[in-house]
Image: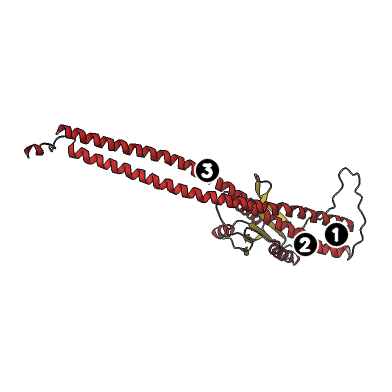
Amino acid sequence: MGGARRVFPAGKPGGLRRGGGGGNTLCRAMAKARAILKRRKAVRNIRKITKTMQMIATAKFQKALKRAVGAKAYTLKVRELVGDLAATLGDVRHPLLRQPTAADRTNRIALVVISSNRGLAGAYNGGVLRAANAFIREQEKEGKTVELYVAGKKGVSYFNFQKRPITQRYDQFGDMPRFTEVRAAADFFTDAFVGGRIDALYVASMNFLSAGVQRPQVQALLPLATPKAKEPAGAKAAVLPVYDFYPSAQSLLDELLPLPLRTALFQCFLDATTSENVARMVAMKSATDNADKMGRALAMRYNRARQSQITTELSEIMGGVEAMKGA
């Protein structure tokens, strides 16, 4: 019994005190390894989500691209047709072509801002909203009043935060805008312009140039530019054909002139949807790649923590053996 009391004397270094400190170190190493393991699992789950969103955005982009490319050919052909008809008539007069003068100017313009309903699209919404905000400030410096028409929840949230009044918001377009819905909005702006309630119509949206290039822009849709006929390439003097119109050419022009506005506004929505899907696809691909890198880094940290834990356990075992030898 007396020999048992002398195994771990109170003042001797090592013994119980050193064993207790080693146990705390082991617990800390185990806790660190478990924390890294949980974080690694969370990163893996996030990677699955971003990869799925990337695949969905890719599928939506392919569908939106077909619609945008197909509609652009129709839009250009409508402008060409209106130009040929206007050149045949000569001096064209139409309410959509009027240029507001000092006598009838109201100093009110309409601005349609096309944003997205969801985030995780990189700099898509930021670019469009910055361009729209810069345009609004420029017009206000000139003494004009800007009426905001916003499509997309992100744009609505932004202008509400800026405390700018929104005249009307459009929530019906979504990922697949339809021509009938855009036509109703275009006819509303046509009536407002013809009735003299606004002097011009502008659209702030993302212009889709290619899969790798999209630029935010603010373009004017009203008043319409005076249509001009397309001149043959290399011709010294344009020879215009003579047409017989039924009904009259002016009646056809009244029917055709609203078409460029409708198709141009519809094209803006199609380009915006295509650009949004491209931006989300690129953003989700970057997020997936970053998750892969983070997963590899966490795996390396976990291996090091586990190795440190094993080393600590071996040190504890060796310390116990030495203590037993000393006894």
Question: Which mark sits nearer the N-terminus, 2 or 3?
Answer: 2
Q: Residue at x 32, y 39 (%)?
A: 309
Q: Quadrant of residue 266?
A: bottom right
Residue 132 at what x, y percent from top left? 63, 54
Res. 178 in view = yes
Which label number is shown at residue 258? 2
Q: Nearer the viewer, mark 2 or mark 3?
A: 3
Compare residues 246 and 205 and report the one nearer the observer: 246
Is residue 147 found left or right of 33 in the rendered image?
right
Q: Distance from label 2 to label 1 (Cα)?
A: 14 Å
Residue 151 at what x, y percent from top left? 62, 60
Residue 92 at what x, y percent from top left? 85, 59
Q: Distance from label 2 to label 3 (Cα)?
A: 47 Å
Q: Nearer the viewer, mark 2 or mark 1?
A: 2
Is residue 71 found left or right of 15 in the rendered image?
right
The secondary element bearing badge 1 is classed as loop
Q: Residue at x 84, y 50 (%)?
A: 230
Q: To which residue does mark 3 refer? A: 289
**Crowdedness of circle 3 by 10 Å Cα count: few (<14), some, many (20+)?**
some
Residue 72 at what x, y percent from top left? 74, 53
Look at label 1 and name its amino acid: Val
Look at label 3 and name its amino acid: Asp
Q: How many marks?
A: 3
Give the colour scheme shown. secondary structure
Compare residues 175 and 321 and report the one nearer the observer: 321
Q: Nearer the viewer, mark 3 or mark 1?
A: 3
Task: Decide: is 54 above or below 301.
Answer: below
Look at label 2 and name its amino acid: Pro
